[in-house]
Image (tube, grey):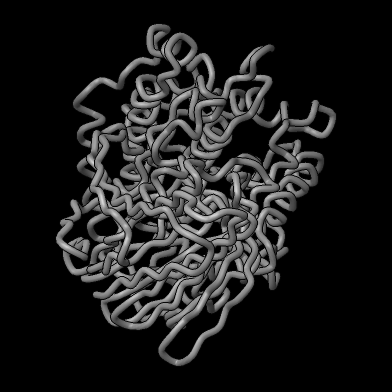
């Protein structure tokens, strides 16, 4: 029986299955494939690719819910088996055949096909099941078997080893592959690399969306392994810390800081949260609505099925009003209708932005001083052009420019936490940002946040070798600011402009992650200042 939580999801599955039966699936043509190599555009091919995965998930889940065969599903399974490659053009290796490499989506496709055919059994034609088994083995199991060359991602400290190894492992378990004895040890070593990507505080440096992705696939695999073998990879204190991350950074009402390549509003896979709450007893965020088939634009089988199977109606533990993640250098404070988050870290984090000392301020259900999050992904964004993209640049984060210079990329350009304290009503957090810059005349820069319900005091303290150095304080928002004599307001948030500082409003059109154009806003406060502390007071 569906729960209240999953009722919308089940309705949308049937709606999407009907669409898949009545309209043709897009083809993955050469014209689409070549776009990435020729222009750097990922979206043309990926739009068609994920439409096919969307149809596949809907048809398979409808057949599962209705317990019946579907010729349209057989046809689509057969068609996916015939795709030239399951690897995205953006991930194809520079040399060698693409099927010698396993990327995120090849592994995910293998998992989907393996689990669909196993779950539905005789509802899928035996010839289709046989082809699925052959293609999954050829494209994923064989390249990852013990004697195959290593993949670069197997030792990476980000989401790739969790997704690739987790999805491939679930596929092998679902098909009861004869390669399991040699495949699983290699995959589990990759999962160990993923777990090492988080410090003892469990923070995901890639941001909340990639927590859902990487940690989600780790959990999905861990539960599949437990079901098959009894071994429990979740029974680990470090895993528990990683599981608590979403609640610790939650701003309330479905909002979270969009640090790194993330979104400031979004949903976590509901089944994943419920399973973690049930198994590990960790607090989880309260999500504003029940899960939808369309929560994940890639329509991943793992997210959809575990949400369908694991969702549970009922109360969950809530996070404490304030969170401190010392290894990541992140603080979050929450009060009724208000929230604040700030980050340190370093400028070579996975999915890095130049954002040391950046902060967000949330009020009345809206993140007013904001993080622009993930841009549209292109070839150049993952190469030399990353910091030319506004969302990743220092100039579109709420951080200072010093003597005409911005923060620099690289591991050595880091923030150091020099102070953190709380009282029942306040939070104070101080960062040394000196190493983030290579500005002339700058010998030290610290940024101190003092948060209290109703406001935020920000104090930047500079040490210069000369007087009159130009400093520009940047404050970024999606809401258009209003500058009056002595104040800047963004709806419910008000900033007192200190004497001697000139304020200017600026705006720019940027491409959001889904490719849509949005206008974003920035206030630039500028002054030539001596050494010392300069305080900026925000009230709500």
* Residue beneath the point at 39% across and 37% down: 390
Using the rendered image of the protein, determine whether residue 113 is visible from the camera's viewpoint: yes
Quadrant for the C terminus in the image: bottom left
* Residue beneath the point at 40% across and 51% down: 472
Q: Where is residue 487 drawn, in percent x and y?
A: 21, 65
Q: Nearer the viewer, residue 323 or 71?
A: 323
Q: Quadrant of residue 182?
A: top right
483 with respect to 38 (left or right): left
Q: Nearer the viewer, residue 433 or 498?
A: 498
95 to 404, vertically: above or below: above
- How many numbered marks are there? 0
289 to 213, vertically: above or below: below
Q: Nearer the viewer, residue 495 or 46?
A: 495
Give the farthest residue toward the front.
467
447 with respect to 488 (left or right): right
Q: Quadrant of residue 3?
A: bottom left
Quadrant for the N terminus in the image: bottom left
Q: Where is residue 200 drawn, in percent x and y?
A: 69, 68
Using the rendered image of the protein, determine whether residue 1 is visible from the camera's viewpoint: no
335 to 363, vertically: above or below: below
Q: Where is residue 139 drawn, in percent x and y?
A: 63, 24
Give the farthest residue toward the right.
147
Q: Where is residue 267 drawn, in percent x and y?
A: 35, 57
379 with respect to 465 (left or right): left
Q: Quadrant of residue 205?
A: bottom right
* Residue beneath the point at 31% across and 58% down: 291
* Residue beneath the point at 26% across and 47% down: 521
497 with respect to 312 (left or right): left
């Amino acid at each position: 029986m569906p729960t209240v939580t999953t009722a919308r999801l089940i309705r949308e599955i049937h709606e999407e299955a009907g669409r898949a039966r009545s309209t043709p699936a897009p083809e993955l043509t050469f014209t689409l494939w070549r776009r990435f190599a020729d222009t750097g555009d990922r979206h043309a091919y990926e739009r068609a690719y994920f439409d096919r995965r969307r149809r596949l998930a809907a048809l398979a889940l409808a057949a599962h819910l209705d317990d019946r065969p579907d010729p349209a599903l057989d046809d689509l399974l057969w068609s996916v088996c015939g795709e030239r490659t399951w690897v995205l053009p953006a991930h194809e290796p520079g040399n060698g055949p693409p099927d010698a490499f396993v990327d995120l989506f090849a592994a995910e496709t293998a998992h989907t096909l393996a689990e669909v055919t196993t779950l539905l059994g005789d509802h899928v034609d035996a010839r289709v099941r046989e082809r699925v088994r052959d293609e999954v083995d050829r494209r994923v199991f064989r390249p990852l078997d013990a004697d195959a060359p290593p993949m670069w991602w197997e030792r990476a400290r980000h989401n790739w080893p969790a997704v690739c190894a987790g999805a491939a492992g679930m596929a092998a378990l679902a098909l009861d592959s004869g390669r399991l004895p040699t495949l699983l040890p290699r995959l589990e070593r990759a999962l160990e690399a993923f777990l090492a990507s988080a410090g003892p505080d469990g923070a995901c440096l890639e941001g909340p969306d990639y927590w859902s992705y990487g940690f989600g696939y780790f959990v999905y695999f861990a539960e599949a392994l437990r079901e098959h073998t009894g071994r429990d990879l979740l029974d680990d204190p470090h895993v528990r810390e990683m599981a608590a991350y979403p609640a610790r950074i939650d701003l309330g009402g479905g909002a979270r800081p969009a640090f790194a390549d993330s979104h400031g509003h979004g949903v976590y896979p509901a089944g994943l949260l419920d399973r973690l709450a049930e198994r590990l007893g960790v607090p989880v965020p309260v999500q504003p609505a029940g899960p939808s088939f369309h929560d994940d634009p890639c329509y991943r089988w793992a997210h959809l099925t575990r949400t369908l199977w694991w969702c549970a109606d009922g109360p969950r533990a809530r996070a404490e009003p304030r969170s401190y993640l010392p290894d990541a250098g992140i603080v979050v404070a929450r009060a009724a209708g208000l929230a604040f988050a700030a980050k340190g870290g370093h400028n070579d984090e996975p999915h890095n932005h130049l954002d040391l000392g950046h902060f967000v301020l949330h009020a009345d259900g809206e993140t007013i001083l904001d993080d622009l999050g993930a841009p549209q992904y292109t070839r150049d964004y993952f190469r030399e052009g990353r910091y030319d993209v506004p969302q990743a640049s220092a100039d579109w984060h709420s951080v200072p420019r010093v003597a005409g210079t911005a923060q620099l990329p690289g591991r050595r350009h880091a923030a150091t936490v020099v102070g953190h304290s709380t009282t029942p009503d306040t939070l104070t957090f101080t960062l040394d940002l000196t190493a983030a810059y290579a500005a002339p005349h700058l010998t030290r820069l610290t940024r101190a946040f003092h948060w209290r319900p109703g406001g935020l005091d920000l104090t930047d303290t500079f040490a210069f070798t000369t007087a009159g150095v130009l400093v520009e304080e940047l404050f970024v928002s999606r809401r258009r600011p209003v500058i009056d004599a002595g104040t800047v307001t963004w709806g419910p948030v008000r900033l007192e402009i200190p004497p001697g500082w000139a304020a200017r409003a600026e705006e720019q059109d940027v491409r959001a992650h889904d490719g849509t154009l949005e206008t974003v806003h920035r206030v630039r406060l500028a002054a030539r200042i001596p050494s010392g502390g300069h305080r900026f007071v925000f009230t709500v």
